[in-house]
Image (tube, rainbow, N blue to C red):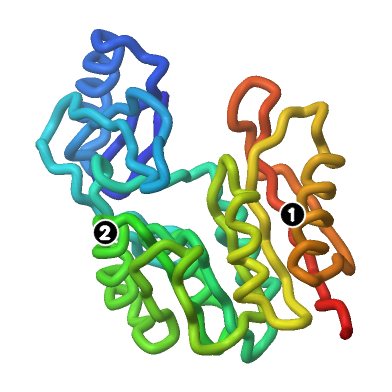
Amino acid sequence: MPGFQLGRVVILNQELSREEALAKAKHILRTVPRIKSVYMHTGRVSGGLRIPKVVYVAGKRNPMTVYRENGCLYKLDVQKVMFSKGNLLERGRIPKLVKPGETIVDMFAGIGYFSLPLGKSSPAKIIYSIELNPDSFRFLKENIKLNKLEGKIIPILGDCRKVKIPEKADRVVMGYFPGTEKFLPAAFSFLKPDGIIHYHDTFKREELWEKSEKILREYSRKQGFYPIRMEKRVVKQYAPWVFHVVVDAEFRKNSI
């Protein structure tokens, strides 16, 4: 399929022409009874609010859908909020790293991409889920209820650089890119004297892995921390010779 499925909605790739998209959409609707609506990407997600560029192609004009992944239900409007299926393995990986009783901050929660599987599958004590986009935040709150995670996930509407939480975190998830480094001071402000940051960003092939390490070392030093270990992995290819990566970086605060 030249795209991906979210519940009863298929979103086609932006590389298709309008004529190709319409032909593919009619074929999908005819051969896959479960699919009721077909939309298409017309460009990359843009801006700090991460608003998708998605247009209607065929079927019912209903961009609302519910998608199941890793035992979680995600309700969303495909024209108002983004969803990257390319992060599937990453969303399933992070909960397995969590130790019992951890406090976690999800700095870019969206509709609960990482927060929901963390709440559902990990032994975390509490997850503070911060989101700036009002539409995404509305779905985040709905998805917390849909997955019966009230009390374990605390939704917070606002800019993660300005938000205050009542306790320090064992683990901070930075599921945002590009330009993630400008949010690192906020990430360190949330972190306990010993803690882990999951740093997502995009880098060219020739920048792997020197640039990501340099960024994390420089910012940790400025915030009074130093790195203990950095485990690096490619999540997916973002563009030709550009990769979405994540660094699991453990830090310790300098003793005075």
Q: Quadrant of the C terminus?
A: bottom right
- Relative to 117, 21 lies left or right: left
Residue denoted by label 1: 247
**Residue 178 screen position, x and y as percent:** 57, 40
Does residue 247 lie above or below 155 as drawn?
A: above
First in residue order: circle 2 vs circle 1: 2
Q: Which residue is drawn at 61% across and 55% down?
A: 90
**Residue 210 screen position, x and y as percent:** 86, 41
- Asked whether 66 or 233 is in front, the reply is 233
Please say whether residue 153 is visible from this viewpoint: yes
Q: Residue at x 33, y 81 (%)?
A: 148
Does residue 76 lie above or below 251 as drawn?
A: above
Mark 2 and mark 1: Cα distance apart in space: 28 Å
Checking the image for residue 134, the label placed there is: 2
Please say whether residue 116 is visible from this viewpoint: no
**Residue 39 screen position, x and y as percent:** 25, 31
**Residue 95 screen position, x and y as percent:** 61, 71
Taking the view exactly as shown, the residue that stands out farthest to the left is 60
- Relative to 209, 133 lies left or right: left
